[in-house]
Image (spheres, grey):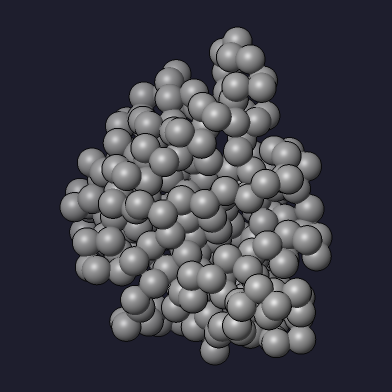
Amino acid sequence: MSFPASAPALSDVHRALAVFAHPDDVDFGCAGTIAGWVEEGVEVAYLIVTRGDAGGFDDTARHRMPLVREAEQRAAAAAVGVTRVDFLDGYADGTVAPTLDLRRDVTAAIRRFRPDRVLTNSPLRRWEHLSGPSHPDHLAVGEATTCAVYPDSRNPFAHPELLAEGLEPWVVREIWYAGGPAPDHAVDVTDHVDRKIAAMRAHSSQTGRLDVETWVRDRLTTVADNAGLPSGRLAEAFTVLRTE
């Protein structure tokens, strides 16, 4: 299974909400693109479902890891110009499922922020690459967020308790998927690669053993080459679907 061909990206986006499973997901896949959106004047906010308590490679005490990774994500967001970073409570790293509770929590965030565009994990597994993008938490967040975009966030009869909180229905116009199979919408991030590298380095509990700059340049060069961009360019790739 794959996505259909991407739709042309909207040109009049004012707000974008990035919904991802763990701290660092958004930076590995999308930080260069987000830096470009911010530079263009798009207001970007992050919603992170877990605090990454199952991550890390050293002997940091498990009870401290959520605090460490939340701080890392806020620093990484600042590196690309994002100031609003929200975390959900009650979802543990490695155990996320696309439940009605998660759909409601993402719907609440959408209605609260009222974005034109939502960027999220892919709900589709990449069988040729089971690690990374195909983490079960990623798939679950992608599925729950897709359901929150349609039908939940626009349906006044979905999660009626949200109306009681003053959260009126909202129609997201576009959804971008990161990490899915055969992404065909490439974004040239050459001019923002330093910000992506800084954002990834901010996640030192996860990237401290990685040569971040080499990793980023190698991966983004491959994406750009596959998309037919001129030699020397760097890109991130997505699938873009209209949701109006």
Left or right of residue 197, residue 242 in this image: right
Q: Which of 72 and 32 is in front in this view?
A: 72
Residue 154 x/y as whole percent: 63, 85
If the image is split into quadrants, where does the N terminus sit?
bottom right
Task: Please say if 52 is above or below 140.
Answer: above
Residue at the limit of the structure toward the top, as seen here: 59
Left or right of residue 101, residue 218 in this image: left
Residue 20 x/y as whole percent: 57, 53
User: What residue is at 67 percent from the left and 56 percent from the top?
Assistant: 141
User: What residue is at 53 percent from the left and 71 percent from the top?
Assistant: 112
Residue 163 x/y as whole percent: 68, 80
Left or right of residue 98, residue 79 in this image: left
Left or right of residue 39, residue 214 in this image: right
Residue 11 x/y as whole percent: 31, 82
Q: Nearer the viewer, residue 41 or 84?
A: 84
User: What residue is at 44 percent from the left and 18 percent from the top?
Assistant: 209
Count the numbered circles shown.
0
Any part of residue 216 in sight: no
Task: Please say if 59 is above or below 191.
Answer: above
Picture quadrant of residue 243: bottom right
Q: Nearer the viewer, residue 11 or 105?
A: 105
Picture quadrant of residue 159: bottom right
Any part of residue 17 in sight: yes
User: What residue is at 63 percent from the left and 50 percent from the top?
Assistant: 88
If the image is split into quadrants, where does the C terminus sit?
bottom right
